[in-house]
Amino acid sequence: MKTKDFDTRDFLQTGVEDLLPSVSVDCVIFGFHEGTLKILLNKFKFHGTWMLPGGFVYKKEDVDDAAYRILKSRTGLDKVYLEQFHLFGNHNRTNIQENEKILNQIDMGSEKPEHHWFLNRFVSVGYYAFVEYSKVEVYTADGEDLRWHHIDEIPQLYSDHNKIIEKAILTIRSQIGNIPIGYELLPEKFAMTELRIIYETIFNKKLDRRNFQRKMLSTGLINKLDETSKKWGIKSATLFSFNKEKYEHAKDSENALFD
C-alpha cells in the first residue's frame, strides 16, 4: 500500500471552486483473489465509516474522465474496464447529518460547517470496474484507509453505497453475457474453478461444474492448456487461458460473449 500526497481536510475546506456543483462519482471496483470476489473500499480515519472510492467532477472535466482519474488514483492502473451503470438521484440519498459529522471532525477554521458545500444534496454517477488483483497498487491519502473486502462481508457503508453495490451486481448479472468479466478479473492462466466462482458469486447460486466448463469451452474463447496447478487442492487442476485475439474480436461484435 502506498500513500499519495492528498489532504482530505484541505480539499473539503478549499476545493469547491473548481468542482461541478452537486455531482459526485462512486466506483464499485471488483477484484478476484484467493478464490473470492472482492470490492475495494476506503474510509477516513477521523470518521471511521467505510465507503466506495469516489470523488467529484471538475468543471472542465468529462464525467467519464473523472471516474478514470479516481480509479487510477486508487489502483495505479491506467487501462481499466469501466462501465457507467446508473445515476443515483433520490432526493434523500445524501445523509446531511453524516456529512455534517465529518465536517465537525475537521478543523474548518472560520467557516461555519452549516454553510459548507459538502452539506448540499448530491447526485452520484455509478460506475463498476474490473481489475486484475495482482496488478493493483493500492494508494491511500494521508489519514485514509483503503482495503479489499469480501463481497459477502460488506459492512454498513456511508450514505447509499450499499445500494450502489447491490445495483452494480444486478446490472452485471443482467449483462454478464456481454461483458468480459472473467477476462478482466483473472490472470493470464487460471483454473476453471476460478471462473465458475466469479459467475456463482454474481448469480448467488451454485453452478454445475461439468456443464459450466462445457459451456465456456463451447464458445471457442477459452483455450485448455497442457499445464496444471495444485492451487485448488491435492488433485491437480487443469489451467486455461483466454484466446485474446478471438476475445477482442467478439467484444467488437454485437453477439454475446457468453450466452
Image: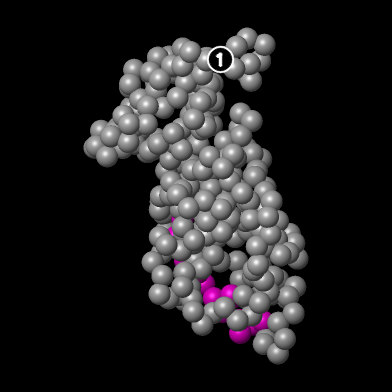
Name the residue nearer the viewer: 225 or 55: 225
Quarter assignment of residue 8: bottom right
Residue 149 in view here: yes
Residue at figure coordinates x 47%, y 21% from the top left: 240
What segment carries the magenta color?
113-126
Give how far across and how far down residue 70 sits, in percent. 52, 60
Tell me the quarter of the picture where residue 183 sits: top left
Residue corresponding to mark 1: 228
Residue at the image position 59 percent from the left and 60 percent from the top: 159
Residue 191, position in %: x, y?
Answer: 53, 21
Q: In this view, does 256 lie to the left or right of 77?
A: left
Q: Which residue lies furthest to the top in this view?
A: 235
Task: Judge left or right: residue 208 versus residue 215.
Answer: right
Q: SS at mark 1?
A: strand
At x 67%, y 48%, the residue is 147
User: In the displayed structure, would residue 12 be above or below residue 126?
Assistant: below
Residue 71 on image: x %, y %: 52, 55
Single out the residue that lies furthest toward the front. 226
| Quadrant where the C terminus is found in the figure | top left
* Residue at (57% x, 78% y) in the render: 15
Q: What colour scheme was applied to this rendering of the protein?
A: one colour
What amino acid type is highlighted by mark number 1?
Thr
Q: Is residue 13 on the magenta stretch?
A: no
Reply yes or no: does residue 124 show up in magenta.
yes
How dense is the environment of label 1, judged by Cα within 10 Å: few (below 14), some, or many (20 and up)? some
Given residues 237 and 181, the one toward you in this image is 237
